[in-house]
Image (cartoon, grey):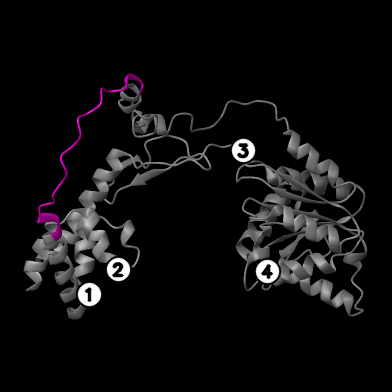
Amino acid sequence: MTNNELERQLTDLPGRLLHNLAKGRVSRHFRMGKARLVQSLLKLSPDQRTEIGIEMATMLSASARPQSTPQPAKPLPPDPASQTSRHRPRHDSTQEPAVSKDALFEGIGTPSPAPFTPDEWQQEAIEHLTTGDVIVSVPTGSGKTYVAVEAMRRAISTDQTVIYTSPLKALSNTKLTEFAHMFGSENVGILTGDRRDNAHAPILIMTTEILRNLLYDAASGEIDMRLDTLGLVILDESQFLADPERGVVWEETIIFCPAQSRLLLLSASIGNPDEVAAWINLIRSTPCRLVHHRNRSVPLRAAYLDPSGTLVPFFRTRDIAQGKAFTLHPDAKRLFARYEDQTLGTRSKR
């Protein structure tokens, strides 16, 4: 069978049979459309294409073979209850009208001025820091930075040193600008691998590796006056505890952190915050409290920008809720199919 003949036969197959042929041969075939799947099968080795031809012939002969069916028994009278339930439409997202592009962007913009009122979980986290360590595990945009800033205000008001760590130099530089605007540039310093400014300021921003090294030096007997007055350590993006390569840095930083210092761990994506809190309770002399919720303060929405410049909703519904199944928006499906035809169609003609 020539490649062109195989392509024609594959194109005529239903999508379900194409995916059956792709099992074990094409990686992630379940994410592909029909045109892309056909092209992926045609790129296989000659031996694999021969196997596909044989399997395809078997499938087609089996579907064409007449099947003997027994004579049906005399049908029973229909049950009114079952008839009603059989024809009742299911309530799912595919039965609801697809969201429009205008509705997708509804409410986005600068909110009206209003007095700020902290959430209960923010107040709870700040109060717990007066007696122990705290893990804040809440969705992005919920206000974790507010907890950090208020805890920093309380610490420096009592002449304590604050260390704020982040996993990236770029994020450290951003926080330097942000905190210098809040507390004054004279009160904020930075220590990274290639930058050292105002190193004895009451608020020090650094990468987690730098803090771990300072704690190493203190453990070996090297005196650092900044650690004597250290009252608060903030570990931002603390989900890096699970990183296979860098996670040990966060572990050692928590283990060697001075007992008089309060620990504040911030993250939006810790998978097991309960276990992390339990571990810190075992290795630290102060109690560790977990402040955890999954309610998004800022709704999450998704849109698709096509290479042609067309912007459409990605899903049929507007907001993305955790644990809810979604179906693609019909306009997004249409653009996906058009893009696939334009790219793979041109490639198949060569």
Circles 2 and 1: CB atoms closer than 8 Å: yes
Circle 3 packing at 10 Å, graded few (<14), some (14-19), many (20+), is few
Q: Is residue 206 left or right of residue 41?
A: right
Determine the secondary structure under disc 1.
loop
Q: Amino acid at mark 2?
A: Val
Residue at 48%, 29% in the rendered image? 107
Who comes first in sequence, dot 4 or dot 2? 2
Q: Which residue is mark 1?
A: 44
Report x, y in % for residue 6: 11, 68
- Residue behind mark 3: 295
Q: Is residue 94 left or right of residue 124?
A: left
Residue located beneath label 4 in the image: 247
Of the pair 240 and 187, the residue shown nearer to us? 240
Check disc 3 and give the amino acid type. Asn
From which residue to which does the magenta span run?
62-81
Dot 2, how many residues are within 10 Å of its Cα: few (below 14), some (14-19), or many (20+)?
A: some
* Mark earlier in primary sequence (1, 4): 1
Residue type marked 4: Gly
**On screen, 230 above or below 183?**
below
Q: In the rendering, at what x and y percent does residue 74 appear?
A: 19, 30
- The numbered dot on residue 26 is 2
Quadrant for residue 259, please give it. Answer: bottom right
